[in-house]
Amino acid sequence: MADSGSDDAIVERAVERVLLHEILPRGPARRELLRAIGSGTLFSALSAFFPLGAAKALAQEKSGALELKEIQIGFVPITCATPIIMADPMGFYAKQGLKVNVVKTAGWALIRDKVLNREYHASHMLSPMPLAISLGIGSRPQATHVAAIENINGQAITLHNKHKEKRDPRQWKGMKFAVPFDYSMHNLLLRYYLAEHGIDPDKDVEIRVVPPPEMVANLRAGNIDGYLGPEPFNQRAVYEEVGFIHLLSKELWDGHPCCALGVPASFIQENPNAFAALFRAIATATAHAHKAENRMEIARAIAPANYLNQPLPVVEQVLTGRFADGLGKIQNVPGRADFDPFPWHSMAVWILTQLKRWGYLKQEVDYRTVAEQVFLATDARRRMIELGLPAPKESYKRHEVMGKTFDPAKPEEYLKGFAIRRS
């Protein structure tokens, strides 16, 4: 029997659900039968008359021939890309009949340009990037989708060791901070955090874009005072004894999106079967990464030079949530970094409010329409259910950000409630 969390077991459960739906009557009669004899006994009996093994094998086959079997996917070497990276050495792509070349890329502007130029079929992207690209913010417009969220949480504010006595953000006027890209959750969350403490992020501090692999070196050199950056570079600063972790992004918004699988609309339209296979690979890899018991194995898979190129203890501390904070304490925060593929429409609406708040998004938009066009929540839900993965019934929910409730049904009201904003 397949392990309950394996890809084979997921497919088996999906086939069994379909069989129950088609053969047994709906309603109380079906429930009574299952309660009386149990699903295991029922499926054993059915297998004598129905070729369950063959059905499960057929379910593993694609709904059609793959238009592409070799796919180019870009990634920036950070732990947010874990499902995209681990799916290569751990065989999740191969199980779907795909050969995926995961290409290490220096930064987000280059990722965006290679996607726009069709050098990458899909890519690891920051969650706001597909929204920005689709709306033509910072580049020519091209319809681009968030097919799946890669990770939730997984960021932190790291400060240089010389600022250990400056834990109050109101003391940060005149300091220099780095974020990985303008259109990033890192930038939006840092701005939100600063503004909540009365610091205008455009007037009272300097925020500059620095590629994640260069953040620790810039901190050491004194070019920046700190950064809100992706892992493992917060932990790497502690490991190098250059900085300390001031705050995990989980403490700002527990469950916030970080990175995503960004896919051009043209790729989905031209290669529907290849896209379906790619989604299956990423979704099952993400489900595997969500389980705490798999994190050490994953750390070993992604730490090597061709992926993250990081010391294994650094990656392990990030993924397990047991880590040194640079302030003399060992923290145990299992949800420091987590993985959930569902692309909530409400997350997209929040991102749009913040892009508008800080002047990146200048035109008026229908928040709901843009969110539903770019974040493929409905498609993800259907595919996740087919895989036997848990998927929410709704695509919108309220989020708590720094103790304030965001209602996605009232984006303009939310936006106008901020004392510090550009729009």
Image (cartoon, rainbow, N blue to C red):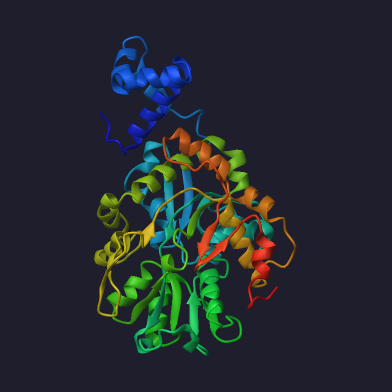
In the picture as drawn, the residue positioned furthest to the top comes out as 49
Q: Nearer the viewer, residue 275 or 385?
A: 385
Q: Position of residue 102 (x, y in %)?
A: 42, 53
Determine whether 258 is above or below 29 in the image: below
Q: Quadrant of residue 103?
A: bottom left
- The residue that appears at 69% across and 63% down in the rendered structure is 412
Which residue lies most toward the right here?
A: 364
Q: Nearer the viewer, residue 80 or 277?
A: 80
Side (left or right) of 230 relative to 363 = left
State the residue at coordinates (59%, 61%).
Answer: 350
**Quadrant showing the C terminus:** bottom right
Compared with 40, 205 (above or below) is below
* Quarter of the image with the N terminus in it: top left
Q: Quadrant of residue 163?
A: bottom left
Q: Where is residue 115 drawn, in percent x and y?
A: 57, 55
Number of on-image labels: 0
Is residue 54 in view? no
Q: Is residue 160 left or right of residue 142?
A: left
* Residue 37 visible in the shown view: yes
Location of residue 417 in the rendering, given as x and y in whole percent from the top left corner: 65, 70
Q: Nearer the viewer, residue 96 or 369?
A: 369
Q: Residue at x 35, y 36 (%)?
A: 7
> Residue, x 36% and y 14% (percent of image)?
51
Q: Position of residue 147 (x, y in %)?
A: 53, 47
